[in-house]
Every structure is written in C-alpha cells, then in structure tokens.
Image (cartoon, rainbow, N blue to C red):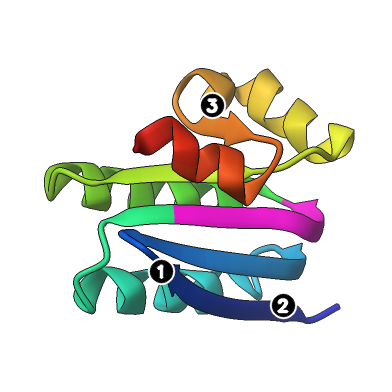
Amino acid sequence: MELSLSSHTDGPFEVIEVGGEIDVYTAPRLREGIVAAIEAGHTRLVIDVEKVEFLDSTGLGVLVGALKKVRADGGTLDIVCTQERILKIFDITGLDKVFGLHTTVAEAMGARD
C-alpha cells in the first residue's frame, strides 16, 4: 500500500491530508511532508488521517515528533480521525490525551481559533 499526501492552506492552518498506510516504510515520506510545511512557516497544522488504513508505531513517532517541533515554535497540531481502529491506537498509547482529536477539519480549526 502506498501513502498519499496532499496539503493546502486554510487561513492560518496548514491542512495535511494523509491516505493509505503509515508504517516503517512510508513514515519518512510523511515526516518529509510535515517538515516541509513547518519549514515553510506553518506551525498550525491539522493532520487529516481519515483515509489512513493502517498506522504503526513509526507513524505515531512521526506525529509525536511533529507535535514537539510545532509546540517549540508556539504552534499546534491537531488530528482529524473518526475511524475506530485508528482512534483505538491513540487511546491504547495514551496519545489521545496529547493530541487534539477531532471529527472534521472544520472542528479542528475551530478548536484553535
């Protein structure tokens, strides 16, 4: 399975839409996409994982690393996810308490306005 990435700017937010599988093989590509957004000056990120079918610990590590980086710059990182199997991973790892988890991109952006 491949990883698909697309991004767009919506006001002060950079929305990164991710699809496919985030695993040891594809996580570096996700990291590159997030780092590129941060280096372009975007520190208010919304990562939409609605189309992600699989997420492993390497992918979680990329998201945690991105959160640390944007927070160091006074930014935010929120995640859009309604899929139970992905939400369960955040719950089991305790990362549901670390990330802002939202059901829509609009909700994620509204939580930070």
Q: Earlier in the sequence, mark 1 or mark 3?
A: 1
Amino acid marked by disc 3: Leu
The residue beneath circle 1 is 34
Classify mark 2: residues with Cα within 10 Å, few (<14), some (14-19) or many (20+): some
Question: Helix, strand, or loop for circle 1?
Answer: helix
Amino acid marked by disc 2: Leu
Question: Helix, strand, or loop for circle 3?
Answer: helix
Percent position of residue 57, x then y: 62, 46
Left or right: where 103 falls relative to 94: right
Question: Helix, strand, or loop for circle 2?
Answer: strand
Residue at 36 percent across and 50 percent down: it is 65
Residue 108 is labelled as none
Q: Earlier in the sequence, mark 2 or mark 3?
A: 2
Classify mark 1: residues with Cα within 10 Å, few (<14), some (14-19) or many (20+): many
Quadrant location of the N terminus in the rendered image: bottom right
The residue beneath circle 2 is 3
The residue beneath circle 3 is 95
In terms of image quadrants, where is residue 43?
bottom left
